[in-house]
Amino acid sequence: MSKLTRIMLDRSVTKKIGVYHGVQDIKTLDENLNLKSLLINDVINEEMNSLIKEAYKISCSTEKVQEMTIANLKNLECMITQESKGLDGLEAFFTYIEKDEWMAAEPTEEEELDPKATYLMLVPGFEGHHEVFTTLCERLKVQAVAFQYGPELINANVSEMAANIKKFMNKRIQLKSKFYLLGYSFGVNVALELAALFEKEGHLCARSRSILSSYKPVFILFFSTPTGHIGVVYCLDSSPDALRAQLDAYVGHLSDAQLQNNLVEHMYKLMNGQDSAGLMLKLEQINSWEEKIELCVNKLRGIVNFSHQYKRCILQGAYTRIMLAKEYQPNFKLQSDLVLIRCIPHPKIKNLADDYGLSKYTTKLVQVFNIEADHTSALYDCRVTSIVNRLLDPKLLEAFKNKNLCFSYVADRTRGL
């Protein structure tokens, strides 16, 4: 079994256990609970037993599997995460596909948000899905909201993606004068564009307030010190320049046709969980990208429970974002702070500036932090969260310190509170 397949299975195990027990993340459950007490009936027990044995390569009886605790699963999950190091090719950028089409179509997962709260806004990489930030969010000292690229963005450019996210965000969150953004991989490009839009909005608001003050003296005191939106943009091991270099290093210098073929083959594996015999041979005989998409879509018919439209969106969206990454050249200077969290570079990457060239896009000095992780495992490194927390506003940290993080639940479901 490939490293990628094991990572996918590991996510399926933890996600299904959470669904069966009515929680989003098994890490919120008591570590001493065993699977026997968590799962519901014999059918579910058998399904989970098979999935756990396949994901973690456990050779033991069903009874032994049932005795496994949440703590045991966490340890196994850490082992799988460590195996993610060393992924190469397109596996370095695409490791996850949402199995729920409806969830994949939403800009964010539907939850109650406090519009006046401060959030760390997370922008995913090529995968375009919020799931990749699960580990990173566990130790944050600020609330986070993760965006994802819905089907309406499969042909959008970077500026259009940022504008779409901003439009949705404005309906749910009240932007503060100081904002926090974190982008990973391709998401750094979108995060930079978002920051430019936020700053522009803040500048226009401040300008309109100044004009209002000159015409209405009653407002002079209220708007005497207009301020714009200036924030912090965390760039997790990427920049426009670095991403092009990373694509060349991990994927190689491929022709457009070779890239299309490799991408279709890889996304087929992600959707199906295994390779397709003869798929690459057929792809090499086709010149049209649209025909290659249809070949993959039809080959998956009856194998996966995805609509044809969803399969096309996955393929087209992935290809569009790769091509955008190769061409993206911002032409703005941000007032916000740029923070580069730099990983160990791929051995094939040469002559990349220490700040990944981010100084071209800001009027300030780029802060650079180095971590001992590679690009593929950056999202699972706890030092990333520590760096984010370190640069938060002291008022946010104080509020977190004083906040009650406990939640209430019914210990005995047969009795009321």
Image (cartoon, rainbow, N blue to C red):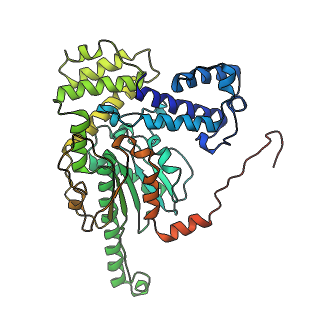
Rendering quarter of residue 341 = bottom left
Residue in view at x 84 percent, y 43 percent: 415
Would you place residue 211 above or below residue 6 in this image?
Answer: below
Give the percent coordinates (x, y) of residue 198. Answer: 34, 62
Q: Position of residue 73 (x, y in %)?
A: 59, 34
Q: Is residue 26 above or below residue 281?
A: below
Q: Could you say which is closer to the camera, residue 36 or residue 220?
A: 36
Q: Which residue is situated farthest in the top direction here?
A: 278
- Of residues 249 and 371, the one drawn nearer to the viewer in this rendering: 371
Q: Quadrant of the N terminus?
A: top left
Q: How many marks?
A: 0
Place of residue 186 in the rendered image (x, y in percent of width and height, measured from the top left): 31, 45
| Residue at (45% x, 44% y) in the render | 380
Rendered location of residue 160, percent (x, y): 29, 48
**Identity of the residue drawn at 19% across and 22% down:** 288
101 and 84: which one is in front? 84
Query: Is residue 393 shown above or below 197?
Result: below
**Residue 210 position by quadrant:** bottom left
